[in-house]
Amino acid sequence: MAIINKKDMFWISFSAIASILFVVFIDNTYQWINKKIIASIILGLIYGYFKLKSVNKRAKKFFDQKKNYALVIAHPDDEVMFFSPTILSLCQHVNLFIVCVTKGNYYGLGKIRKAELYESCYYLGIPKNRVLFLKDRKFFDHPTLKWDTVLLSEKLQLLLQTFQINSVLTFGPNGVSGHINHIDLHTAVCSLNSYQILYLKDVNIFRKYTSCLDIVYTYFSQPSSNLLFINENMSKTFWSLRKHKSQFVWFRLLYIIFSRYVLVNDWIVYKEIQS
Ligand SMILES: [Zn+2]
């Protein structure tokens, strides 16, 4: 249960008074609008807003402010396509690093995409010095090429040690989209030792593209042990995606409209730190 502070109380009172005045106002001027429907929508939005805040607050409590966290991704743009609800909530709360395995060089645009990742992360709230690349040519951006996950795990471990990372977040077993690089990354991260490991829950294709409807389903269907982040700032997600100019084609716009991953992230704690 979230603790409602004075600021929240102010906004609840303000919203309630505004709702009453609004309903009275439309009763006198727009008789054709069903005032009960309007009142229900307003109250629903107020309830949803505070529920959203409480969900993110609850998830944040799990993350220790004294520790360093790394979100490990495969390609520049994964951070905003799949993880922006988490990044936006956590980047001010903990020391969050982004570790990107490749520069996304499949079409020879690695240099451009690397710069785009820095820009996107900065816009999301992560400075350049916390955006790291693995820099190993063996792990090439490719839709069908399998990575050596044992070697990848070793390389990641070295990088994580250098930056004193305590906990790692990454893709789930199906890598959201089924991309082989995402799946191999999940395997490599899950075999790391001495780290707390969390992975993003995969959902079926129907849920994946049901946008905000899936927030409701996710909220009521998730086990209480799962951690849930709901996007607090969709405009930041949109403009961060725009920073990936080399990738911004029309279907990316459709993706951001329909994908639930830009709105909600639910995490599974796969491994706790062994003492
Ligand atoms: Zn990717």
Image (tube, grey):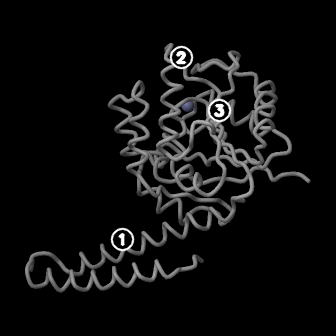
* Relative image position of residue 16 (x, y in whole percent): 33, 83
Q: What residue is disc 3 on? A: 132
Pair 2/3: label in front: 3
On the picture, is 232 further left or further right than 226?
A: left
Answer yes or no: do the residues labelled 2 and 3 have beta carbons within 8 Å?
no
Q: CA distance from mark 2 to mark 3?
A: 19 Å
Q: Which residue is depicted at the point 82% across and 29% down?
A: 154
Task: Compare marks 3 and 1 and give the one earlier in the sequence.
Answer: 1
Task: Identify which amino acid the numbered label 1 is placed on.
Answer: Leu
For marks 2 and 1, the one nearer the N-term is 1
Task: Name the residue type under label 3.
Answer: Leu
Label 1: state its secondary structure.
Answer: helix
Lateral position of residue 39 relative to residue 4, left or right:
left
Pinpoint residue 158: horizontal percent, then vertical percent.
Answer: 81, 31
Q: Please state which of the two labelled residues, at mark 3 or mark 1, is closer to the viewer.
A: 3
Q: CA distance from mark 2 to mark 1?
A: 43 Å
Q: Is residue 76 above or below residue 233?
A: above
Q: Is mark 1 within 8 Å of ligand 1?
A: no
For ligand 1, tell me if the residue under mark 3 lies within 8 Å: no
Q: Quadrant of ligand 1?
A: top right
In the picture of the structure, the residue carrying the numbered disc 1 is 45
* Disc with the residue nearer the chain's start (2 vs 3): 2
Q: How many marks?
A: 3
Which quadrant is home to the N terminus? Answer: bottom right
